Amino acid sequence: MEFDFLPNLPKSNLDDRTFEDLVEECLQRIPRYCPEWTNHNPSDPGITLVELFSWLTDQMLGRFNQVPRRQYVAFLELLGIRLQPPTPAQVEVTFYLSSALPQLYTIPAGIELATERITSEEAIVFTTEAPLAIGCPHIRHVLTAPQAETMPQSLRDRLANRWSEMGAGDWGGPELALFNEQPQPGNCFYLVFDEADLLDGNAIALTVKGQQATPTGINPTLPPRRWEAWDGEQWQPILDREVDDETQGFSFSELARQGGNPLQGADVLLHLPVEWPAVQFTTYRGRWLRCVCLPAADQRTPYEATPRITGLACRSVGGTVRASQCTQIERELLGISTGEPGQTFTLASTPVLPRQADEHIVTVDALGTPRRWVEVNDFADSGPQDLHYTLDAGQGTIQFGPQVREASSLQAQVRAQMGARSRSLALAASQPEAAALEHQYGAVAPRGSRIFMAAYRTGGGIKGNVQTGTVRVLKTAVPYVTQVINRRPARHGSDGETLDQAVIRVPKLLRSRDRAVTPEDFETLTLQAGQGAVARARCLPVTTDGAGTVRVLVIPQADTTTIEQGLGLAPTALSLEPLLEQQILSYLDERRLLGVQVTCAEPDYTGVSVQAELFLEPAFNHAEGREDVLQRLRLALYRQFNPLIGGPDGEGWPFGRPVYVADVIALFQAFPQIRQIGAVQLFEVRHQGDRWQRLPPASVIDPGSEGTICSWFDRHLNSGHFLSCY
C-alpha cells in the first residue's frame, strides 16, 4: 500500500543503512574481533556469509521502516474506522401465476430466487424484501381527455349511461371511441381502478373487446400509442414489449388473421409500478393508468380513425417485488456466555450486510427469558445496564462491552498499601476502592445465557449486478407461481471496502467531521450515504437567489461490462432511482446546516457520436484486419467517453468538460495500425422530449456545467461510432 496521497514532509528512515553499508561495517570490524582472518576477497566463504547476513539485516530494516505505515493503520483503528461491507444489488423480480385467482393472494417476504448455476460460476441468490399482494382489479371509470396532462383536468366519463358493469369490474356495451374522431397526438383515455384493491406492482392482463380494424392506417407491429401509470410523482411506461399487446394497438390484426374473434377479446399485459398509490384528479379517485395517442415517428404511422371497443375486463396474473442479492440466516446460535466482560463471538457467514430492524442479538437466560440487545458503533456512551454490542461486518465478529480500569485506581491501591498497618488490611481497603474505579462499558450477558443472532443477511458485491432475464430460478416453493424473472438488470451492487480505499476516505472524513458545510463535504457525504451504490457526486455552487438550496448531482454505480461488449454505457443504466435518492437525502438531512435545503438529481447526460475516415498500414489493410481495428477503436471510444471509467484519468469523464475533435484524434494516434487520419466529425446526441436525437455535426460538444459525456450505441437512433478504415 503506497501512501503517496499524504503530504510529503521531510523525514528520514528509522535506520537508513543500506546493504553496502552493512557489508562495509562488518568488514571493518573483522580486524578487531578476528585478526587472524586476513582474506577479505569476495571468493572467501566467510565474506559470502557476511553478505548473506547483511542481506537478511537489510530486509529486516526495510520492514522496520514500515512501522509508520502500520502506525497509520493503528491510528485508523483508534478512530473507530471499519471497512465498509459490500452493498447488495437491488432488482425487481416478477412472479407470474398459473392463472388469475378469485381473491387476494399474498406471497410472503423472504422468498429466495437465483440465477442459473453454470460450471464456471455459482448461482447468485436474491431474497425478496417485502410481501407481494396480488389483488383482484376492478375498473370503476373510463375517462377520455383531449390532451395528456401531468395532472388531468379535462376529463369526460364514457361509462355513464352507456356501458353496464357485468360483474367483478368487467364492462361492456355499444362501441366506445377511445380518442377523438380524428385522432390527434396527445388524445388519451384513462382507466381508474378501485382504490380498495391492493395492486402495487401487479402484472395485469387488460382484456379489450372490439371489431377488427376500426383504427386504420397504423402499423400493427408498432402502433402509435403509449401505456402509462401514475406512480404518485410521474407517469411511468408500463408496457414492456410490443408483443405483450395482443390487440396490436386495438386493431386485432394478428388475432383476426389466425381466425380468432376480436369480440371475445385480446389481452394487453401491463406491469404496474411497484408503488401505485390511489390519488384524486378532479372528482375521480382511484389508481390511474392511461393510453396516450402518439405522433408519427420512426416506423410509427398515425391513427386515421379512432379505435373503438365494446368491452373491458381485467385480471391480475402476477406481480413485481423488490429483491436484494443476499442470503438470510435466522436464529444462529453463537455460544454460551461466561459472564465475563468483553466476550467476542463470530458469525458463521461473512460478510454481514447492513442490519435491518429485525436483525439483532438475543440472549436467553437459564429461566428462558429472552433479552434483546442493540448494536452500537462503539461503547463510548454505554453504561453498565445498557444492552449494547458491536459488530464488525467484514469479519463477522460480535463483541460485548469491556470493563476498563481507570488510571486513578492504580494510584489508589498504592496509597492504600503505603498507609495501611498490615498487608491484609491494605488489600481489604483497596479492593472496594478498585472495584469502584473499574468502569463497565455496556452490560454483561449473564453466565450460562445462550446467545443467538436473531437474523442477519450475507452476500453483496458487484457480482450481483446481473443482466435482464437472468434471475429465473425459484429456490423457495410458492404455490400457483409458474415463472419468475427479472425484467430489468440488477443495480447498485458493490464490493466491500479495501484498506487502501479506507486510507483514502479517512482524510475526507476528518475534514468534514460528519457535517455538510462546503461543497466537498456534500460530495463526500453523498458517497458515504450511497454505501457503495454511488460512483460519483458533484455539488453545484449555491445559487445567489437567497433560497439556500444545495443541488447534488449523483452518478450511481452501473455494470460496465456492456462497454467491453461494444455497446457502451447507456444513460438509462445510470438513472437515479427514488429509493437511492431518498436514502441520500435522509443521510444529508441529518448533517446539513439549519436552513439549507438539499436536492439530488441526475446529471445532464450528453451523447457523442464519432464519424471518422481512417487509413491503415498495409499490413492491416485487409478484411480481417480492418474488422479487428474497428472493434478496437469502438471499444477505446466507449472506454474514453463515459462517466464511470472514462476521461483522461480513468475516473469518469469530468463534469462540464467539453469534447473536442482533438480528443478523438489523440485517441486514434495511440493506435500503430493507423497510418493516416482523415476527416473526423462529432455529433451531439441530446434527450429531447421522450427520445434521443442526433444533432448536426459540430467541432466541439459541450455538456454544460451540470452534465457529462456518455457514449453508447442506440439501434433505434441508428447512432454510434461510424468509422471507415481504408
Image (cartoon, helix red, strand yellow):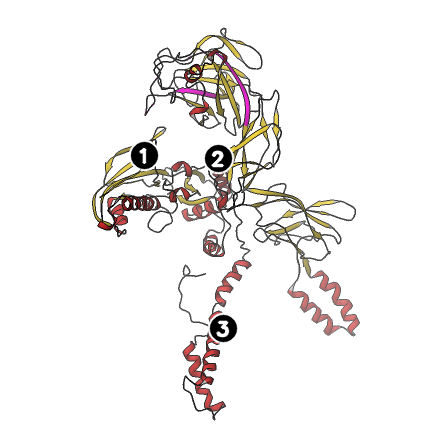
Quarter of the image with the N terminus is: bottom left
Task: Relative to 256, say whether 583 is above or below.
Answer: below
The 10 Å Cα crowd at callout 1, few under 14, some 14 to 19, many 20 or more, is some
97 shown above or below 607: above
Residue 354 highlighted magenta (yes or no): no
Q: Residues within 10 Å of mark 2 (few under 14, many from 20)?
A: some
Left or right of 193? Residue 433 is right
For the magenta stretch, what is the residue range? Answer: 289-318
Q: Position of residue 668 (x, y in %)?
A: 26, 48
**In this figure, which residue is indicated by the disc labeled 2?**
469
Of the two numbered discs 3 and 2 in the rendering, the one whose residue sits closer to the viewer? 2
Query: Residue 60: which numbered mark, if any?
Result: 3
Q: Which amino acid, mark 2? A: Gly
Earlier residue among tags 3 and 2:
3
State the image coordinates of residue 410 (x, y, percent, origin top left): 67, 68
Q: Can you tell which mark lies on residue 686?
A: 1
Query: Taking the image as drawn, is residue 279 in sight?
Result: no
The quadrant of the picture occupied by the C terminus is top left
Observer-nearest of 525 and 304: 304
Q: CA distance from mark 3 to mark 2?
A: 55 Å
